[in-house]
Image: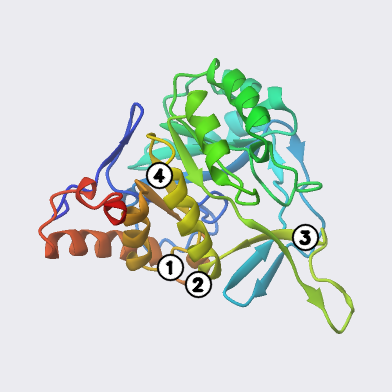
């Protein structure tokens, strides 16, 4: 299928290639332009499902900024019970691995969601969204290593599925939270969620977003997230999934060289619907042109 071995193994899950959407950044059904088959992706990532039903934040929810976008969607959700009954069956036979992102307002919500999921065979792995910056005050479970450890420890008891812990970038140092995730049984860490940010409309003289603040994503955050991935690679031995500013295959290669095992594409999907397929092809061509046999040959190479 590829010129080189692009596969990545995380826990019990094996991904055919290292590219997936970021949570909430791709629609696989009604609003999907069907420009390519989902089977071309290394995995599909389902937008965060909350333990409870939630309306999300008031509009306006999205704003364009220089070098990216702000979003303050606020995790609207039909709740895990409705999701399992009505939505999850739609993801069967997608032709690639399915990763479910889950969220909660309380620590025990994550365990409860995983217990109800009951290691459903449709799902290959679960990403724990501990770090959404646009819910309430923006306080994230992954901002405090102790809280992260407690929440993950409880969640870990409820499933055998691989768990990805999505970390917040809005911390003084990413290394303590990365290590806490590894110590309490995470199979991988996602580095990272969006950066807290805001925008003011100079005509209305008010914040643009209905929630005042939101999360910034897009090409402008890539250098910051690159440093976080670099630091995490020097801190943990579990795989790192890089998320932040991937807009072309060169960005993905850079992340791999910093230590990432996989990448997520978010904002660029709204700009170029073919971005993820182009990134996969570019990675494969780069490895082959440099006589590399697999991603392992370049992972963390910039550290040497």
Find residue 271 and name its label. 2
Identify the residue at image location x=72%, y=59%. Answer: 214
Identify the residue at image location x=24%, y=53%. Answer: 298
Find residue 301 and name its label. none
Question: Compared to 57, does 247 lie above or below?
Answer: below
Image marks 1 and 2: residues in contact by CB distance under 8 Å: yes
Residue 3 falls in image quadrant: bottom left
Give the residue at mark 4: 233
Mark 4 / mark 3, whichever is N-terminal = 3
Mark 1 / mark 3, whichever is N-terminal = 3
Give the residue at mark 3: 213
Q: Secondary structure under badge 4?
A: helix
Question: x, y percentage for residue 26?
Answer: 51, 55
Of circles 2 and 3, the one toward us is: 3
Give the residue at mark 1: 247
How far apart, in angstroms, are the residues tagged by discs 4 and 3?
30 Å
Task: Determine the residue located farthest toward the right in the rendered image.
Answer: 205
Of circles 4 and 1, the one toward us is: 4
Identify the residue at image location x=84%, y=82%. Answer: 202
Q: Secondary structure under badge 2?
A: helix
Mark 2 / mark 3, whichever is N-terminal = 3
């Amino acid at each position: 299928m590829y010129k080189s071995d692009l596969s990545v193994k995380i826990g019990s899950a094996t991904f055919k290639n290292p590219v997936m959407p970021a949570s909430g950044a791709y629609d696989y059904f009604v609003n999907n332009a069907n420009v390519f088959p989902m089977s071309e992706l290394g995995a599909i990532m389902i937008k965060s499902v909350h333990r409870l039903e939630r309306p999300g934040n008031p509009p306006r929810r999205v704003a364009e900024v220089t070098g990216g976008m702000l979003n303050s969607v606020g995790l609207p959700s039909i709740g895990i019970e409705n999701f399992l009954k009505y939505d999850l069956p739609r993801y069967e036979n997608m032709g690639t691995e399915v990763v479910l992102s889950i969220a909660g307002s309380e620590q025990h919500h994550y365990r409860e969601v995983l217990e109800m999921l009951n290691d459903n065979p449709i799902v290959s792995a679960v990403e724990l969204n501990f770090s959404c910056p646009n819910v309430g005050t923006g306080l994230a479970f992954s901002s405090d290593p102790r809280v992260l450890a407690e929440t993950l420890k409880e969640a870990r008891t409820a499933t055998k599925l691989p768990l990805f812990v999505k970390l917040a970038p809005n911390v003084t140092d990413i290394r303590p939270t990365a290590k806490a995730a590894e110590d309490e049984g995470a199979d991988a860490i996602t580095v990272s969620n969006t950066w807290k940010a805001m925008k003011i409309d100079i005509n209305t003289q008010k914040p643009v977003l209905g929630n005042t603040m939101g999360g910034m994503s897009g090409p402008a955050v890539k250098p910051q997230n690159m440093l976080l991935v670099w630091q995490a690679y020097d801190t943990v031995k579990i795989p790192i999934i890089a998320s932040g500013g991937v807009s072309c295959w060169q960005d993905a290669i850079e992340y791999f060289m910093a230590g990432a095992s996989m990448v997520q594409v978010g904002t660029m999907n709204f700009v170029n619907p073919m971005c993820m397929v182009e990134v996969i092809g570019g990675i494969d061509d780069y490895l082959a042109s440099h006589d590399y046999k697999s991603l392992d040959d370049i992972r963390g190479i910039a550290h040497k």
